[in-house]
Image (cartoon, coloured by chain):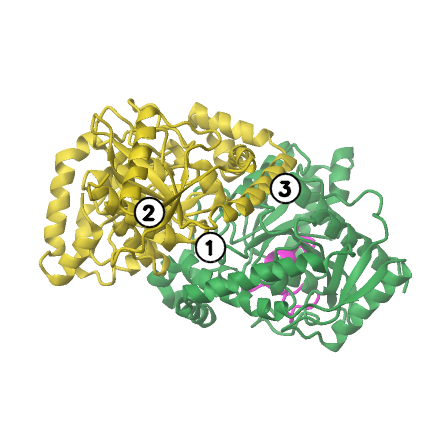
Chain colours: A yellow, B green
Amino acid sequence: MLSALDLARELEAGTLTPDALFDRIEAAIAEREDTIRAFACRDLAAARAAARTATGPLRALPLAVKDNIDTGDLVTEYGSPIHAGHRPAVDAAIVALARRLGAVIPGKTVTTEFAFFHPGPTRNPHDLEHTPGGSSSGSAAGVAAGFFPLALGTQTGGSVVRPAAFCGVAGFKPSYGRLPMVGVKIFSWSLDTLGLFAATVRDAAFAAGALAGRDWRVDGELSATPTLGILRHQPGAQADEQMQAALQTAIRCAEACGARLVELTLPEVFADAFRAHTTIQDYEATRALAAERDMAADQFSDHLRQTLDEGWALTAADYDAAQTTAADARRACQDLFSGIDALLLPSAPGAAPRGLGSTGSSEFNRIWTLMGVPAVNVPGLYNGAGLPLGVQVLGPRNGDKAALAAAAWLEACLGSGRI
Amino acid sequence: MLSALDLARELEAGTLTPDALFDRIEAAIAEREDTIRAFACRDLAAARAAARTATGPLRALPLAVKDNIDTGDLVTEYGSPIHAGHRPAVDAAIVALARRLGAVIPGKTVTTEFAFFHPGPTRNPHDLEHTPGGSSSGSAAGVAAGFFPLALGTQTGGSVVRPAAFCGVAGFKPSYGRLPMVGVKIFSWSLDTLGLFAATVRDAAFAAGALAGRDWRVDGELSATPTLGILRHQPGAQADEQMQAALQTAIRCAEACGARLVELTLPEVFADAFRAHTTIQDYEATRALAAERDMAADQFSDHLRQTLDEGWALTAADYDAAQTTAADARRACQDLFSGIDALLLPSAPGAAPRGLGSTGSSEFNRIWTLMGVPAVNVPGLYNGAGLPLGVQVLGPRNGDKAALAAAAWLEACLGSGRI
């Protein structure tokens, strides 16, 4: 994998030129893209040319863009045949801001259909017979395969944290509202959140902080040893044996590195919140995609069509009740973080499932997306077959730096070999 | 003006055909559109054809769409030369929902540049030398001129309530988040809100409720006599003598009709909230329009370019402080409505100013858009020169029906001639 921070330092020092960087990523892409299929489309020549003259904190760093995010110079199909060949008028805000910071866009990455569940062709670089996760399938797989150091994704359920976990890369979903959604194809406006993929947590924090215009960097001194809340159970979610073992390893390792640990249980309202996520998502999605539904519902996957039908059957009262539950749970969530720096729990039920027909389950992610809290997948653990097992670190709402600092601390701790 | 409710009843009864309705509006447009300039573009033939086969609660009702809202079949330029000739891939969600309900789209209405301040060519039907207000200039003027019974607008500062007041029509900005913003060109995502223009409050409530899928109709029995909070002063806003007299008339009239009145003053935090609105708006707008700013800032008006430059100079800390102030003020705003049904205050500093170089001031609207509360312009009062003077009725957040009921009650009361 390519570390964005390392590349930035080498580019700054002049020990790496943009052309040499592009030679390296083009070689990786030439070798493996035919099987991995991370890209929906790409224009490496344009990105290389842009990199030569780029300036700014992200200068010349390739940032791939999930294909549910508009680009003015690259076809943007939202993972749906309905939008085949679509060329947006202008870049999404986040893409324009990235270019302003010096980043260059090598291409668009495969998203599931409208960033929901129906998978694209992307495979997991750790084992081609396994899903890379979704919906940000190509962004996670491409970072894992060394095609680019950085990639944008979005999360409505678990679409950043889960594929990051399955592909063994860092994935960071900031607090709701921290990165501008203008020009992102909306599925559920109360939930959709932009996120970043990178080789390590520190790389993700570096790039996300630059994009947000916030001091989120955690690549200096390691932060003070954190107090971590451990969450072994949450409603609707069941970790398999491998994941339970991975969480236990992370806990023992954190303890060995000096972390204070507090076992926590979730209050009852989170069980309601788990259900509220689906209600809010489906009610909003059927409206967000109303034009496509009326125009070309026959081009939807069965799963999406059925979800939008169910969403249309929900009443305003159903939706209002779900939003009230979400607000109650957000208050309870604030209390949850009193006395701890961050929460530690599985990123997914286990390693990436075998097969490409499904992108796996977001059951460990949905509640936290609804809570709007920052979530970081920490890579570094693997099962016996060499497939990554991700654990996630959560911070309080708008405590993005605290979450990133704790995640970077844990990442270093897992990498230290101490158990 | 055309009452949507009356037209719906006549269409239902068969005493009016869609073609006869279109004959009527085409005659009005032929007579006055050359001078009023409400439309950015139009296709009356397509709308007429759609009306013939339309079904649903809004069947065959012409609903004009502000040109910052995407339409798949009509050019959408966002009031900016940067997007000249732009044709969106699909309808905005609100447009698709409107068509699903049977409404037909006669055309797009003039918006100021990106729904900010720089005016388009629209004139006020009550006096062609006066502004119709903005940013939803064409929607308000077109309803006033009888070109269509319904029109969509958006409000970030005062872009629905103010033009409705200046043009003497009902304007309804629902609570923040009640109508889906997908496919609306975003200026400030924390503030932008869709709204409706119609001949009367009852017409606006009828159409807005259908679009929201909520029971907002207030055209049955008049609601119980309301308790109204009277707000004579608010930070940053100054009513002229005509408007002070109009508010006094509305108060006396409401009293004569039996309303209970409570004089209220705003707590201190609203002065900070007034300033916070500008900070939030400018910080977000410079990001929302980042692509346009980098690509074609020379095609911005001076006012917009300067606003986006100022927005870019704001820090994340400035923005966070403004959002904290807004949250504090929203809590205070909830208390404000305890013991009253609705608030009554001016919609604007006075009647529509003379001249087309400015669309007037949103000083009476910005705080309430930031609070996310429903706001209704109630028409019915005029100055000596025959220009409308609007007063607005506000309800608590998500108390849209209460606000509409009080506004409809006041509208009936003003129409009763009792003082």
Q: Residue A224 has which mark? A: none
| Residue linked to disc 3 | B211
The amino acid pointed to by label 2 is: Ala
Q: Mark 2 lies on which chain?
A: A
Badges 2 and 3, same chain: no
The amino acid pointed to by label 1 is: Glu
User: Front-most of B408 and B368?
Assistant: B368
Q: Can residue B73 be seen in this view?
A: no
Measuring from the top left, give residue B321's x and y in whole percent.
49, 65
Q: Residue A259 has which mark? A: 2
Q: Chief secondary structure of the magenta span?
A: loop
In the picture, measured across the screen, residue B85 lies left or right of residue B118, that is left
Start-end of magenta stretch: B120-148
Q: Gap between marks 2 and 3, in whole Å? A: 53 Å
User: Front-most of A11 and B207?
Assistant: A11
Measuring from the top left, give residue A47's x and y in whole percent.
20, 51
**Neighbours of disc 2 within 10 Å: few (<14), some (14-19), many (20+):** many
Q: Do the residues bearing badges 1 and 3 touch, measured as CB atoms within 8 Å?
A: no
Provide the secondary structure element on which disc 1 rests.
loop
Measuring from the top left, give residue B183's x and y in whole percent.
49, 46
Q: Which chain carries label 3?
A: B
Q: Is residue A108 visible?
A: yes
Provide the secondary structure element on which disc 2 rests.
loop
- Tell whether position B130 is magenta: yes
| Residue linked to disc 1 | B77
Measuring from the top left, give residue A63's x and y in whole percent.
26, 49
Q: Earlier in the sequence, mark 1 or mark 3?
A: 1
